[in-house]
């Protein structure tokens, strides 16, 4: 019988990391989740604790990372990810994107493992090219409040490429666009949990700016499929994964009000500094290289997401 493959998932107790743990276990891998729980929660992975093919390490990956035995794949997803999280933890965000990534690249090299790093549409900053293609270099303010996240991720991409070209390491870079689904934290400040929890609590929905800025929301299962395909592909350059269905934040708020049968209205608050005005992935590469495209419409993805939030808010 072929030996089971082993994967290390950093940020494994977070929103995306925990879904990745589920997916890789389902595919028959041995899974190690590593997390320091600064924004994640053991609740996301407690259903896995009794399994023999799953292990959890409580560890900060910005410090030296040690994993005993062989390792086939590393998925580096550890990082504060929502604007309020990385604004609260600017130094930790910079460290996990830089020192953390360096540690994991070193581990990948020592173990002869393939590594995929979670980059972001934020590397495009407030984009001047629309939709965003992977060859666009971005419009980022390095010293603005979002710079701690954007520049950490840009450095992460640069050092990952350097390990690929200089050491011949097998690397993959995914640029993730706004993704949602069950296990997002209610209070992480991202627009979807904010709007849904406000609607369910009977509060008005806080729309920042005039709500004309756009985002494109991808359901988590679609993203996980894209990650899985990219990891197993032989493509070392960045690939966008996201749903190209673009919507203004104002329309999105109205959609949530309708969906939750809420009587609330939108109230308008100041737009945060450097908030990107428009965002939509060009997914040509994902389609051509990975044969990937999103399967879930917003209406389909919002259904299980709303159920999840109902259980949390009304508990
Ligand atoms: P999340 O906050 O739910 O998960 C991040 C996890 O990383 C948490 O469990 C946290 O405790 C852990 N973590 C943070 N710093 C750590 C450290 N130094 N050592 C060990 N663990 C650490 O966020 P998420 O939405 O699941 O995001 C996961 C990854 O995907 C992040 O790298 C993020 O930048 C990237 N990403 C997410 C989105 C999205 O829409 N969700 C979009 C673009 C990129
Ligand atoms: N936003 C909003 N109300 C909120 C939270 C966010 O209008 O309560 C806006 C935010 O200003 C941005 C968009 O929604 O224009 C998406 O924000 P989010 O924090 O979800 O992610 P981003 O794409 O900005 O990283």
Image (cartoon, rainbow, N blue to C red):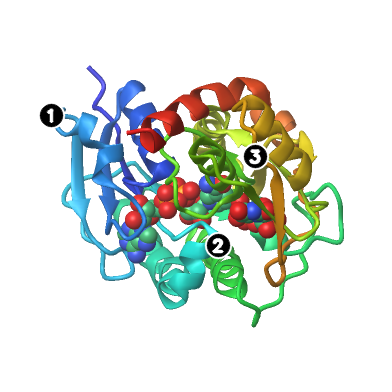
Badge 1 or badge 2: first in the primary sequence: 1
* Residue at the image point whose x is 60% and y is 72% from the top: 151
CA–CA distance in space, label 1 to label 2: 34 Å
Mark sitting earlier along the chain (2/3): 2
Task: Decide which of 118, 13 is in the foreground and name it.
Answer: 13
Instruction: Answer yes or no: is residue 203 visible.
Output: yes
- Write down the quadrant of residue 260 in the picture: top right
Quadrant of res 257: top right
Instruction: Report the Cα–Cα distance between label 3 and label 1.
Output: 43 Å
Queried on whether the Cβ of the residue with tag 2 lies below 8 angstroms from ligand 2, the answer reads yes
Q: Position of residue 30 (x, y in %)?
A: 25, 33
Q: Is mark 3 within 8 Å of ligand 2?
A: no
Instruction: Tell me what residue is drawn at x 50 percent, y 29 percent.
Output: 305
Q: CA distance from mark 2 to mark 3?
A: 25 Å
Mark 3, mark 1: which one is toward the viewer?
3
Q: Are marks 2 and 3 in contact (CB under 8 Å)?
A: no
Which secondary structure, mark 3? loop
**Residue sticking out furthest to the top:** 1
Q: Position of residue 54 (x, y in %)?
A: 20, 34
The residue beneath circle 2 is 83
Residue at position x 55%, y 74% in the image = 148
Tell whether 260 sits left or right of 58: right
Residue 264: assigned label: 3
Q: Is residue 170 visible in the rendered structure shown here?
A: no
Relative depth, front residue between 86 and 106? 86
Please give the residue where the numbered disc 1 appears in the rendered image.
50
Closer to the camera in the image, 219 or 17: 219
- Residue 55 lies, in percent from the top left, at 18, 40
């Amino acid at each position: 019988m072929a030996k089971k493959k082993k994967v290390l998932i950093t940020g494994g107790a977070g929103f995306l990391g925990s879904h990745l743990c589920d997916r890789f276990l389902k595919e028959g891998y041995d899974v190690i989740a590593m997390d320091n729980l600064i924004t994640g929660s053991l609740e996301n992975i407690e259903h896995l604790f009794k399994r023999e093919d799953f292990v959890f390490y409580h560890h900060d990956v910005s410090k030296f990372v040690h994993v005993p035995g062989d390792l086939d794949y590393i998925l580096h997803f550890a990082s504060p990810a929502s604007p309020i999280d990385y604004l609260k933890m600017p130094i930790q965000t910079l460290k996990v994107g830089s020192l953390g990534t360096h540690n994991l690249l070193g581990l990948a090299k020592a173990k002869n493992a393939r590594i995929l790093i979670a980059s972001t549409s934020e590397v495009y900053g407030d984009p001047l090219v629309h939709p965003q293609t992977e060859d666009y270099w971005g419009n980022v303010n390095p010293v603005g409040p979002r710079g701690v996240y954007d520049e950490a991720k840009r450095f992460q991409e640069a050092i990952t490429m350097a390990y690929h070209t200089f050491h011949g390491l097998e690397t993959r870079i995914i640029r993730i666009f706004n993704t949602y689904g069950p296990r997002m934290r209610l209070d992480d400040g991202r627009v979807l949990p904010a709007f849904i929890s406000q609607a369910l609590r009977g509060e008005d929905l806080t729309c920042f700016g005039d709500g004309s800025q756009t985002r494109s929301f991808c359901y988590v299962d679609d993203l996980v499929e894209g990650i899985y395909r990219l990891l197993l592909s032989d493509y070392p350059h960045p690939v966008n994964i996201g749903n190209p269905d673009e919507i203004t934040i104002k329309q999105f708020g109205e959609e949530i009000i309708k969906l939750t049968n809420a009587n609330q209205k939108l109230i308008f608050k100041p737009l945060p500094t450097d908030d990107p005005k428009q965002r939509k992935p060009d997914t040509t590469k994902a389609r051509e290289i990975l044969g990937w495209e999103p399967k879930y419409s917003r209406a389909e993805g919002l259904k299980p997401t709303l159920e999840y939030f109902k259980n949390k808010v009304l508990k």
